[in-house]
Image (spheres, rainbow, N blue to C red):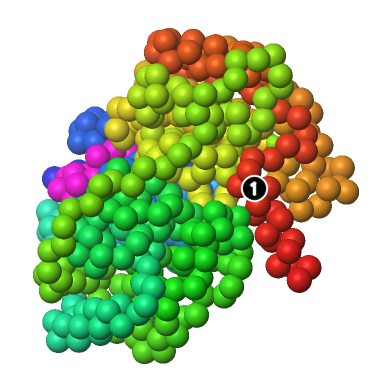
């Protein structure tokens, strides 16, 4: 077998399910093998940022890597932002880029798509991936590929694989499937778990906070058991909303500092035994903490290490930590799953729509037709999602890039076969909404809610005097029809409710609901975030 065939065989052996991509001349040979071998399904999209976002979302749903395949230069460099987002949010995306071969390098000419140097691209990707390999020697390729795939899975971070176009058809040995375990010092693990159990046992008000790593490593069941065995209340981070939903644990809700429910904020910020499990210490998770979290009284288990107060246990993988704690802690009686109130029962009137009405209408729809997985863009649509019933949610909650919503929804449907609900602002839709034109080819049929306030409203919230936040009011419903879907424009609560019913009833194509919102309106959560942020900024 040749290099490309061995690479594809290895991807499948490591649990990868699909490839998103856009070819180019440096990648044509590779894409030829992808298409002809049918080892993995290939979904081509229209612009490389969408390729990266779709692979990111698919990886999050699989809790296994997904592939973003692109050409050298113009393609791969177009995709740096989505891979940076994946790196920041610990989403295991495998970037496979075509590359120049020996003949390209020996002309003495500048090569098309080359930036500064021929190796500039891999240099750029060093900053947004945890491992990088250039497969310019097929004798080394099997070990290089195995190392990169293992690191992608163990670290749950993107990796970069460059395939020079003159190597694709070269004979190559099979790629070894390495054990997907990371080193863990059992004595250190034993001491660490003892210390955690003792610290939480001595605390008067311990709290467990869970974050995205729990999902990335597929640990929700084990963590639900751990939280019951610890017998302490659980909260999720903003990025971890939806974690442990429906599980029989003492789940209190999502911590959002000054923007959150006051009693939950106090529960966390007054705790003398806060256990952060799989939590990224990011500003979106903690930036608007009313009171700074006292890290001296905090256990933080993230990124493969555990810190307690001022000392650190390196090389303690999260899976090993959770398993060891569960092994040590005694069983406790079962709990009932916590129930949370989300807004329901939209009034069917001819009044204009608010962001909270959208959450209410979606909750009503979920109760009528069943919950859908949600893919949300950055903007007030993400804050509105905080008022939606618990369901699987992918969103750039920490890295906060726009453009994520539509492509990630397509990635969710490609990965799971399930119809997603996509939430996107009008500004973000202008970035990657056109990707909906790919739905017809693949039979995808998302329901897309465009929060159309003809505004960069989040920016206006922080800088209302700037007129550049005023966007044109576009007819996204008409655009949907042109892209192969069905568009509905709604202005009142009654129209929104009816449009959702029609969208759910029609599964033949994507459904876009262009929801007219007045400028200046914000969701409850964003209003509290903005107020909290200004309060902290202005003292
Ligand atoms: N470009 C990209 C790729 N991502 C970003 N997050 C930004 C710029 C900055 C930015 C925001 S929020 C926002 C921008 C431009 C406006 C979003 O407008 P829209 O999608 O219409 O949503 P809404 O009207 O609900 O705000 C964040 C703060 O960085
Ligand atoms: Mg907007």
Of 525 and 136, nearer the camera is 525
Of 339 and 157, nearer the camera is 339
Q: Is mark 1 within 8 Å of ligand 1?
A: yes
Examine the rendered structure and indicate whether residue 368 appears above or below residue 326.
above
Does residue 65 show up magenta in the picture? no
User: Residue at image x 45%, y 85%?
Assistant: 296
Of 438 and 237, nearer the camera is 237
Q: Residue 165: give x, y in percent of width and height.
A: 36, 48
Which residue is labeled 1 in the image?
Answer: 526
Judge the density around disc 1: few (<14), some (14-19), many (≥20) Cα neighbours within 10 Å. Answer: many
Identify the secondary structure beneath mark 1: helix
User: Residue at image x 39%, y 64%?
Assistant: 209
Asked if one can make out residue 235 in the rendered structure from this viewpoint, the answer is yes
Q: Is residue 269 left or right of residue 307?
A: right
Quarter of image, res 214: bottom left
Q: Residue 286: give x, y in percent of width and height.
A: 54, 66
Where is the C terminus found, in terms of image quarters?
Answer: bottom right
Examine the rendered structure and indicate whether residue 212 appears above or below residue 482.
below
Quarter of image, res 122: bottom left
Q: Residue 505: give x, y in percent of width and height.
A: 42, 10
Of 471 and 41, nearer the camera is 471
Q: Is residue 28 left or right of residue 380?
A: left
Where is the N terminus found, in terms of image quarters?
Answer: top left
Asked if one can make out residue 135 in the rendered structure from this viewpoint, the answer is no
Q: Is residue 414 left or right of residue 6?
A: right
Does residue 9 show up magenta in the picture? yes
User: Residue at image x 88%, y 48%?
Assistant: 465
User: Residue at image x 24%, y 40%?
Assistant: 17
Q: Is residue 201 left or right of residue 432?
A: left
Examine the rendered structure and indicate whether residue 443 appears above or below residue 40.
above
**Magenta stretch bounds:** 8-20
């Amino acid at each position: 077998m040749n290099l490309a065939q061995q690479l594809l065989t290895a991807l499948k052996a490591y649990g990868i399910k699909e490839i998103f991509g856009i070819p180019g001349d440096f990648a044509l040979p590779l894409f030829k093998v992808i298409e002809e071998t049918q080892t993995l399904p290939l979904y081509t999209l229209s612009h490389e940022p969408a390729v990266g976002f779709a692979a990111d979302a698919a990886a999050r749903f699989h809790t296994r890597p997904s592939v973003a395949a692109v050409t050298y230069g113009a393609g791969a460099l177009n995709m740096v932002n989505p891979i940076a987002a994946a790196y920041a949010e610990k989403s295991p995306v495998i970037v496979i880029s075509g590359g120049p071969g020996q003949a390209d390098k020996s002309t003495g000419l500048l090569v098309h798509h080359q930036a500064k140097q021929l190796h500039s691209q891999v240099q750029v990707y060093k900053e947004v991936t945890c491992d990088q390999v250039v497969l310019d020697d097929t004798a080394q390729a099997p070990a290089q590929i195995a190392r990169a795939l293992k690191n992608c899975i163990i670290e749950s971070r993107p990796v970069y694989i460059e395939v020079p176009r003159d190597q694709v058809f070269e004979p190559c040995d099979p790629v070894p499937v390495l054990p997907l375990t990371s080193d863990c010092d059992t004595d250190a693990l034993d001491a660490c778990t003892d210390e955690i159990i003792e610290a939480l046992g001595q605390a008067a008000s311990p709290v467990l906070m869970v974050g995205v790593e729990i999902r990335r490593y597929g640990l929700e069941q084990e963590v639900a058991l751990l939280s019951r065995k610890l017998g302490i209340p659980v909260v999720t981070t903003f990025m971890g909303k939806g974690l442990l939903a429906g599980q029989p644990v003492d789940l209190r809700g999502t911590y959002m500092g000054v923007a959150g429910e006051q009693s939950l904020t106090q529960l966390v910020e007054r705790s003398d035994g806060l256990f952060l499990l799989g939590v990224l210490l990011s500003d979106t998770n903690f930036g608007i903490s009313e009171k700074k979290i006292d890290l001296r009284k905090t256990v933080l288990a993230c990124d493969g290490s555990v810190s307690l107060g001022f000392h650190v246990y390196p090389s303690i993988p999260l899976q090993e930590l959770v398993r060891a704690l569960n092994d040590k802690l005694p069983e406790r009686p079962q709990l009932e799953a916590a129930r949370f109130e989300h807004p329901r029962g939209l009034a069917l009137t001819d009044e204009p729509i608010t962001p909270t009405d959208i959450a209410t209408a979606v909750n009503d729809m979920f109760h009528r037709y069943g919950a859908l997985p949600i893919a949300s863009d950055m903007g007030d649509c993400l804050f509105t999602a905080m008022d939606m019933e618990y369901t699987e949610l992918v969103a750039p909650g920490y890295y906060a890039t726009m453009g994520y919503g539509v492509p990630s929804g397509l990635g969710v449907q490609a990965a799971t076969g399930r119809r997603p609900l996509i939430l996107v602002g009008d500004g973000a839709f202008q970035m990657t909404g056109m990707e909906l034109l790919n739905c017809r080819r693949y039979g995808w049929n998302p329901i897309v809610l465009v929060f159309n306030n003809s505004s960069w409203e989040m920016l206006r919230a922080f800088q209302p005097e700037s007129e550049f936040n005023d966007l044109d009011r576009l007819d996204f419903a008409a655009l949907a029809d042109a892209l192969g879907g069905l568009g509905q424009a709604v202005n009142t609560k009654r129209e929104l409710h009816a449009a959702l019913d029609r969208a759910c009833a029609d599964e033949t194509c994507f459904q876009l609901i262009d929801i007219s919102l007045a400028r200046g309106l914000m969701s409850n959560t964003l209003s509290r975030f903005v107020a909290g942020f200004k309060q902290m900024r202005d003292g």
